[in-house]
Amino acid sequence: MDFSICIDVDDVDRAVEFYGHGLGLTVVEQQPDWAQVKLGDQTFWIMKAPAGVQGQISRDYRRHWTPVHLDFAVDDIDEAVRRAVNAGGKLEGEIQHGAKGAMANLADPSGNGVDLVCHAKK
């Protein structure tokens, strides 16, 4: 089964900067209201969706929590955080280090939660 991941944003250009340059996803195509990016074979659609209420859905692009978020495995947590922040992401707290590796909680430029995870070397 194939599936795509859709990320609603308020600004496609800022999102492409973050997910493309900041996290290293490949930009396949970019338009004013959407972009297609890939990580390996996985497709991500960045979709511009206005803030406010549309029908029964309300969108607010301040930082928000959602039970579904994206985790990206990285080899070097410090370098990955630096690139993500330089591309518009916001680091939330300190990088957490533990026996299983390290994790950084970030928000993308539209307030969506993203974690960078660096697994401990075996």
Image (tube, rainbow, N blue to C red):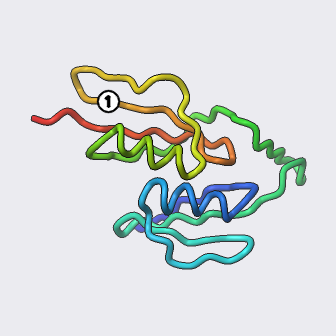
Please tell me whether residue 33 is drawn above or below residue 102 in the rendered image: below
Q: Name the side, left or right, on which 41 lies relative to 108.
A: left
- Total number of numbered discs in the rendering: 1
Position in image of residue 99 (x %, y %): 22, 21
Identify residue type, mark 1.
Ala
> Extreme left residue here?
122
Label 1 environment density (alpha carbons within 10 Å; few <14, some 14–19, many ≥20): some
Residue found at x 53% / y 37%: 106
Q: Name the side, left or right, on which 16 lies relative to 20.
A: right
Callout 1: helix, strand or loop?
strand
Quarter of the image with the N terminus in it? bottom left
Q: Specify the quadrant of the image occupied by residue 117.
A: top left
Position in image of residue 64 (x %, y %): 69, 34
Residue found at x 70% / y 55%: 9
Residue found at x 55% / y 55%: 18
Residue found at x 90% / y 48%: 53
Q: Name the side, left or right, on which 83 lies relative to 48.
A: left
Q: Specify the quadrant of the image occupied by residue 14.
A: bottom right
Position in image of residue 90 (x %, y %): 58, 38
Please tell me whether residue 78 is drawn above or below residue 46 in the rendered image: above
Quarter of the image with the C terminus in it? top left
Q: Circle 1 sits on which residue?
A: 102
